[in-house]
Image (spheres, rainbow, N blue to C red):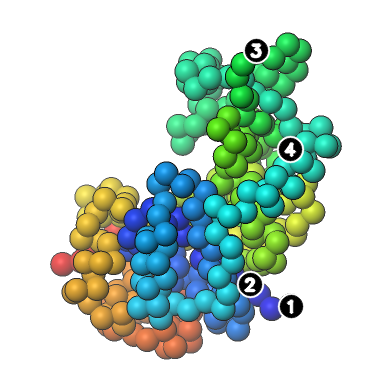
Amino acid sequence: MTPIGRFAPTPSGRMHLGNVFAAMIAWLSIRSQKGQMILRMEDLDTQRTKPEYAQTLREDLNWLGLDWDLETQPQSQRTAVYDHYFSQLKAQGLLYPCYCTRAQLHSLDAPHASDGTYIYPGTCRELVTPPEGRTPSWRLRVPEGIWQVEDLLQGTYTENLATHCGDFVLRRSDNMYVYQLAVTVDDGEAGVTEVVRGLDLLSSAPRQMYLQTLLGFSHPRYGHVPLLLAPDGRRLSKRDRDMDLGYLQTQYTPEALLGILAHAAGLTATPSPISLQELIGAFSWEKLHKDSIVLSLE
Ligand code: GLU
């Protein structure tokens, strides 16, 4: 079976170095296995995303030489597909409407997970008389049980969804589907076998595995790569102009930038410029650092 990987950027701004880093490793892993790469624009949030950003993303990937074999439909055009899977879960009695307001959710006595999100205590699970005149969000019932991710880089990561997040939202009250559903359906339908992305998404993997099981998709392999930090320890973000590719392209060649990132990743002995072809030869998951990487571009 041909390995299939993907780039799944959110076109909400210019790629920054952290995005480039994750994309480079995703690409190297797939290309070193002679697999195929898919590009998918995760533009569910039409307020934040723009087609111009999607175009710039493609150009930035091209500039780096990170090519792909197929671009699949952007998420903003797939509502009917998500409707289909959503109805399937609803028909199985796995979903229920939730009328809790944002204010109610934030004032919950329920403990908050370490990442600042709340654990939904199931307030609307058995609701008999729904309040009138409000559009609900829809939550997925989450049973007790341990989900285990065998991450290519982070090792074994386990999570009990019931105590990590509780029943989670699949469709918001404004009828927008959430990332967890869209990403599971899109990766599943495209036959993605390998998901490589930033470490901040490791704790999403168990929710996606649960949805894969319910919707009949196989689990991909996961590799969650470290986040890049600025010298002061902050995580790089789209606000760091000097780390976005628009600026970096005026200072570096693609090979120079790849050389710096490959060295920071643990793949090469020095940060000298290097081509992607050479890097394919140097790539292995065993060499990669798993913890956050502080990067300073002088
Ligand atoms: N669209 C997400 C992002 O840009 C990535 C989601 C994923 O790789 O699963 O952060």
To which quarter of the image does residue 31 belong?
A: bottom right
Q: In the rendered image, which residue does mark 4 sit on?
A: 145
Between tags 3 and 2, which lies in front?
Answer: 3
Residue depicted at 20% across the width and 60% down the height: 242
Disc on res. 1: 1
Image side of residue 170 versus residue 251, left or right: right
Between tags 4 and 1, which lies in front?
Answer: 1
Mark 1 lies within 8 Å of ligand 1 (Cβ measured): no
Front-lying residue, 161 or 106: 106
Q: For numbered disc 1, what is the local secondary structure? A: loop
Q: In this view, does 149 lie above or below 285?
A: above
Q: For numbered disc 4, what is the local secondary structure? A: loop
**Label 3 close to label 2 by CB (< 8 Å):** no
Q: In the rendered image, which residue does mark 3 sit on?
A: 131
Q: In this view, does 269 lie above or below 239?
A: below
- Quarter of the image for the C terminus: give it: bottom left
User: How busy is the neighbourhood of tag 1: few (under 14 within 10 Å), some, or many (20 plus)?
Assistant: few
Q: For numbered disc 2, what is the local secondary structure? A: strand
Q: Can residue 96 be seen in this view?
A: yes
Image side of residue 2 versus residue 43, left or right: right
Q: For numbered disc 3, what is the local secondary structure? A: loop
Between discs 1 and 3, the one toward the N terminus: 1
To which quarter of the image does residue 278 belong?
A: bottom left
Marks 1 and 2 sit apart, C-alpha to C-alpha, by 9 Å
Q: In the rendered image, which residue does mark 2 sit on?
A: 4
Between discs 3 and 2, the one toward the N terminus: 2
